[in-house]
Amino acid sequence: MNLAISELKIQAKIMLKAIKAGGSLLTKQQRQLRTLNLESTQEIKLKHCHFLIAKKYGFDSWQHAQQILSGDELSNSMMNMGTLFHSSRCDALINLWFANYKEAQEALAIDEQNRWLIPYKQQYIVVNKEYLKMIGLDRGFDQHWLNIQHNLVKGYGSDSWDILAVAALKN
């Protein structure tokens, strides 16, 4: 379960190198850094980039990202999975959104071959193949999806979940 955490660390190191080489931050990232009381990008350290990367994927903090991506968080009742498995490119697609996991499971059960259950913060989305294409989890991952029965919540903490999470982070 360390593949996804390693990918986030790599992304943070790449961000730090880019900033130190004279790169700029997005406006949203600059606002987030101001909350950390940093005056310039030259003051940025790796821990700040960890924070920015975690926020990019909808986590509250680096610690929150580590907790979720490590597979240690087991309570489905208040689990916040961030926005790791969502992209704004998918907003135009019609998907089924649920605040309740049981209802999402029931929607998945209607057509388990053509639907997938995806976490979004503290909600659940039941999606189709087009959604998976948009986030890059459609090709080459069939066995991993079968291993977790098309359900990223049920499969949480498994090796297949970790592999799918890394693929989502890379896309």
Image: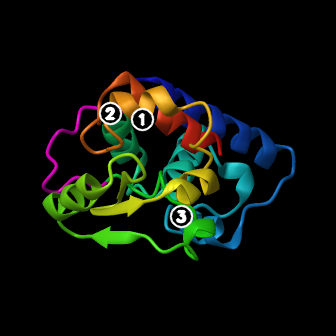
Mark 1 in CB contact with mark 3 (< 8 angstroms): no
Tell me the kind of residue under disc 2: Ile
Residue under the image location 12 percent in, 55 percent down: 77
* Residue at image location 29% in from the left, 36% down from the top: 156
Q: Which residue is mark 3?
A: 37
Residue flagged by tag 3: what amino acid is it? Asn
Mark carried by residue 3: none
On-image quarter of the N terminus: top left
What residue would you read off at disc 2?
Answer: 148
Magenta region: 70-80
Single out the mark in the foreground, 1 or 3: 1
Q: Which picture quadrant has residue 148?
A: top left
Kindly indicate the quadrant of the structure image that contains residue 39.
Answer: bottom right
SS of the residue at dot 1? Answer: helix
Q: From what the image shows, is residue 155 above or below residue 34?
A: above
Query: Which is the main secondary structure of the residues drawn in magenta?
Result: loop
Q: Which residue is mark 1?
A: 145
Task: Report, in whole angstroms, how far the alpha carbon at label 1 lies from the one at label 2.
Answer: 5 Å
* Rendered position, 85 above or below 99: above
Q: CA distance from mark 2 to mark 3?
A: 42 Å
Q: CA distance from mark 1 to mark 3?
A: 43 Å
Q: Is residue 40 visible?
A: yes
Residue 16 left/right relative to 104: right
Label 1 neighbourhood size at 10 Å, few (<14), some (14-19), many (20+)?
Answer: some
